[in-house]
Amino acid sequence: MLSEYAGYKNWNNFKAENEVAKVDMPKKGKRKWILLLVFGTFLLSSAYFLIPRTTTFSFCFMDQDRNTTIIDIPINITILNDKQSPFYIKSDSLGCFNWTTKDNFIHFIITSPYHKSDTIFRTTSSLSNKEQIKVHTDDYALMLHYYANGKVENWKKRRTELVRMIANDAIIFQVLPSGLGIEIYTKNEFIDKITTPTKSLKGIEIIESKRLNEQIVKLKFRIKS
């Protein structure tokens, strides 16, 4: 009687209709949550790839001759990344610098009053925790600086360093231009040559050096015209 009063034919009709409702409702709700989960995952994935990511490059500068970090004189750094104006910074008190960029590479030039200039290019594929870049000393600029400023003690210090760096029996020779052969130097002759500020010293280029027990035992160089 109650079933008929509620608009159903009989009890079996009432029971059948309500069982279908109980079964259908969770299915519809479950389908709704699945759609929401898929849509939410899509939004999060899109946001991850659309948000610009940054990379931090870290470098420290080492003196090629002394094999020590360059901390006395800051290295000038000019960043040349694409679509940006050149950015100028200096190495810090530890002889290092960091650069954070949205690019997957870094392109920069290093200059110093007493070291040779160099152009560096690195990509994220070659990224290391903190790369050490070896910089060659510009002996010509260094010697001119010592002479021009009367810093005799510095000049003497440089000679003392060279005496310590180069083994007494080191093999030192200059490759002469135009295939004319080589010229052999003793340790003292070579030290005299690179500590005397002549025009030829400005073009000196170390081709090969070999170290043993923290001393140079073989040195090959040339003077570029």
Image (spheres, rainbow, N blue to C red):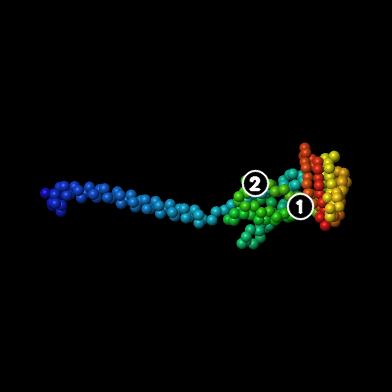
Q: Position of residue 23 (x, y in %)?
A: 26, 48
Q: Is residue 155 left or right of residue 18?
A: right
Q: Position of residue 72 (x, y in %)?
A: 74, 48
Asked if disc 2 and disc 1 are in contact, CB closer than 8 Å, the reply is no
Residue at the limit of the structure toward the left, as seen here: 1
Of the residues shown, which amino acid type is indicated by label 2? Lys
Query: Regarding mark 2 in the picture, which secondary structure is present there?
Result: loop
Q: Position of residue 148 (x, y in %)?
A: 84, 55
**Distance of mark 2 from mark 1, alpha carbons?**
21 Å
Q: Residues within 10 Å of mark 1 (few under 14, many from 20)?
A: many
List the residue tagged with mark 1: 115
List the residue tagged with mark 2: 130
Q: Position of residue 88 (x, y in %)?
A: 67, 58
Q: Residue at 15%, 53% (x, y): give it.
A: 7
Sequence-wise, the earlier of marks 2 and 1 is 1
Q: Residue at 30%, 51% (x, y): give it.
A: 28
Q: Residue at 39%, 51% (x, y): give it.
A: 37
**Residue 180 is at least partly visible in this image:** yes
- Residue 123 is labelled as none
Image quarter in which the C terminus is found: bottom right
Q: Is residue 211 left or right of residue 27?
A: right
Query: Regarding mark 1 in the picture, which secondary structure is present there?
Result: strand
